[in-house]
Structure formats: structure tokens, C-alpha cells
Image (tube, grey):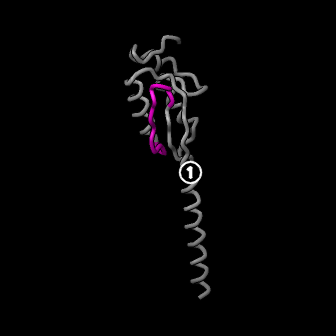
Amino acid sequence: MKNTILLLAIFSIFFLSINLRAEDKWIETKIKTTAQCEMCKQTIEKKINKIKGIKHADLNLEDKFLTVKYNSNKVNIDEIRQAITKLGYDADEMKKNFDAYSKLPSCCKSSCK
């Protein structure tokens, strides 16, 4: 009987901790980019949506903000920003990788560098 009660208590604590983590782990944020065109949108969304822990990423070309919903237990905001900069785009205050930027098609490059 004591073992049964102890097992029930352990399982209850275990499942309660899983439920609490599940509620807190998804974060939605916006990242300002230097995307210019539909090709930029496709490139950024494709890459960011492949990152483990990303639920969805959607780039609005009008305001150049990438909306990202991510699991903060698997990926952090700086890793997402770094992935964007490695594609050749600014991500908030992080500056683009200039080697990647130089390889972008001309339609993806901003008029001011």
C-alpha cells in the first residue's frame, strides 16, 4: 500500500512538471530583418523553419519583420538571429555576414550597405 501511494505521488509530480514546462516553452517574437523581396522571404522562412525547436516563421515583407514561434527549451533567440545573419541579412541589432550577403542575388540586396 505504501509503495502504491509513493508511486502515485511520483507519477503525479512527474506529469505535473511536464505540463508546467509545456505551457511555458513556446515563445513568439518578431525579428527585424533587411529582407527585400519574395526570394528573401522564401530563403529566410525555409532556413528558419528547419531549425529544431521552431514551430513557425513567417516574414512580412511590408515591415520586414520575421515572426517566429519557437520552443525556448530547444533554441534561443540569438541562435535564430545568427541563422538569419548567416544567410546575409541583418537580424535586429546583429549585422549580416558580408560573405553571405555578397552571394545574394541583386534583388535581395538593399540599396544601402
Residue placed at 55% from the left, 67% from the top?
15
Point out residue 107 in the picture as x, y percentages from the top left corner.
39, 15
Q: How crowded is the residue under tag 1: few (<14 C-alpha within 10 Å), some, or many (20+)?
A: few
Left or right of 92 in this view: 111: left
Magenta range is 52-65
Q: Quadrant of residue 94?
A: top right
Instruction: Name the residue rendered at 49%, 32% in the picture.
Output: 66
Examine the rendered structure and indicate whether residue 52 appears above or below residue 61. Answer: below
Q: Position of residue 106 (x, y in %)?
A: 40, 13
Instruction: Identify the element where label 1 is drawn.
Output: loop
Q: How many marks?
A: 1
Quadrant showing the N terminus: bottom right
In the image, what residue occupies the spot 51% across and 17% down?
98
Residue 105, position in %: x, y? 38, 16
Residue at 53% in and 35% down: 80
- Residue that protrudes farthest toward the bottom in the picture: 1
Can you say whether 55 is above or below 23 in the image? above
Circle 1: residue type: Lys
Residue at the spot of label 1? 25
- Residue 54 screen position, x and y as percent: 47, 43
Report if residue 66 lies within the magenta region.
no
61 with respect to 21 (left or right):
left
